[in-house]
Image (spheres, helix red, strand yellow):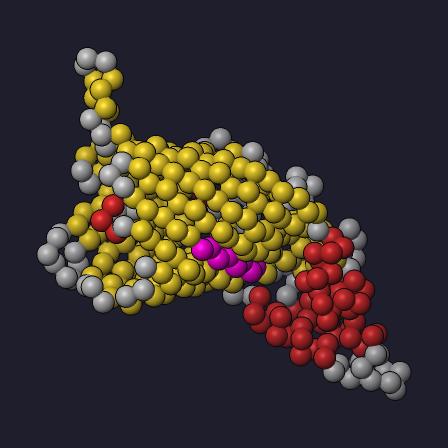
Amino acid sequence: IPSEYGLEVELINMNISINENIVDFVTDLGDATDAPGDLDGDGIPDEDDDETLAALDVFEAYMGKNLHFDFNDMLSVSRKGEKVAFAVAAFGGASFDFRTHRGFGTDGMMEVQGIGYGGVALGGSYDFKEVSLGSKYELNNFSLGFGVKQITYFSVNDAITINEYIDNKDDFGTYVQDELAKEGTSTVFDLGATYHVLPDLIVGFSAMNMGGVGDKDAVYIPATYNAGIGYIKRWEGHKFFNQIRMAFDYIDIGKGYEQDTDIIKRTRLGLGVNVWDGWFSTLSLRTGLYQGAPTYGMNLRLTMLQVGYAYYEEEVGAYAGQDRDARHVVNLTFGW
């Protein structure tokens, strides 16, 4: 947080992420089951049996495809002084993935994995400048941060049968939360540090979600330890192309996510450029590599409103390139 910004308030910081399958799937499923007709040929249209057959046809069309939805929002207040910074925030969101099957066996008709959450966070940091370490060393341009989050959650990892869906299709989300989800509260801690090797070159380390979020029998977010390096160059007094940002991150060094060991899945590269930057508006373009696949996006600021878009591919398989899931993210931020 630049200290010259003073007190910063974000009333909205909202992200919505979907993949390329879920919108079509929801639309097709709703159209098929609302008035399916007499699919079973018994002379009586729109019965439960007809709805079941209509739903099975849609699930057959999307067999094996991943369906993804993610939403989160955060309200925050923060301030940076000469050496000390603080932030308080309230947040909430949900992230779900679905994968359809033929409806037989233990996999049921659809696998559901997801977590819904809400909570509060408190964070602070301290910049070490001209701090003596004995008579020979001086600690400078080093920042240490700490955070704590209290999170109430419900998480689910289950298989849904065709009858479960038909019986609860009018309020399917409530059924999943009330009947299938595991609920609880987690308190987790974050720790981070950055060091300016050169004025424009920064290295960083973070330990996130220490203590873990969620239920290990459903969806669980483990602690992750991450490292990165970033380069920021800014040309003051220029309105066009006045800043470039480059970054490399390696995520989950300790392999808190035990289901794979792929190095490329944990690697991120990024490049961002300000096309123009003024008091009223700023336009930034971005690109990079995420889990071995290219990403691109943009961010437009209009005084207190920011709108962003990003495209990326999430690897839902065990290694990069096995089962990529193309996703679109829209961000809306309002604050000052």
**Residue 118 falls left or right of residue 239:** right
Quadrant where the C terminus sits is bottom left
Asked if residue 14 is among those painted magenta in the image, a careful observer would answer: no
Q: Position of residue 114 (x, y in %)?
A: 62, 52
- The residue lying at 22 percent from left, 49 percent from top is 4
Q: Which residue is drawn at 66% across and 44% down?
A: 184
| Residue 136 position (above or below residue 59) | above
In front here: 118 or 42? 118
Q: How many marks?
A: 0
129, above or below 107, in the image:
above
- Residue 76 x, y percent position in the rendering: 42, 52
Q: Is the magenta stretch mostly helix, strand or loop?
A: strand
Residue occupying image coordinates x 59% and y 61%: 67
Residue farthest along the top direction in this orientation: 135
Image side of residue 175 versus residue 233, left or right: right
Q: What stretch is highlighted in magenta?
A: 68-75
Work out which residue is located at the far left of the displayed protein and give it: 237
Location of residue 181 in the rendering, given as x and y in whole percent from the top left corner? 70, 51
Foreground residue among 24 and 64: 24
Which of 50/233 is in front? 233
> 55 or 129, which is in the foreground?
129
Q: Which residue is drawn at 79% across and 57% down?
A: 104
Task: Tell me which corner region of the image, top left, top right, bottom left or bottom right, holds residue 167.
Answer: bottom right
Q: Is residue 269 left or right of residue 118?
A: left
Inspect this view and state whether residue 42 appears. yes
Measured as percent of width and height from the top left, residue 23 is found at 56, 70
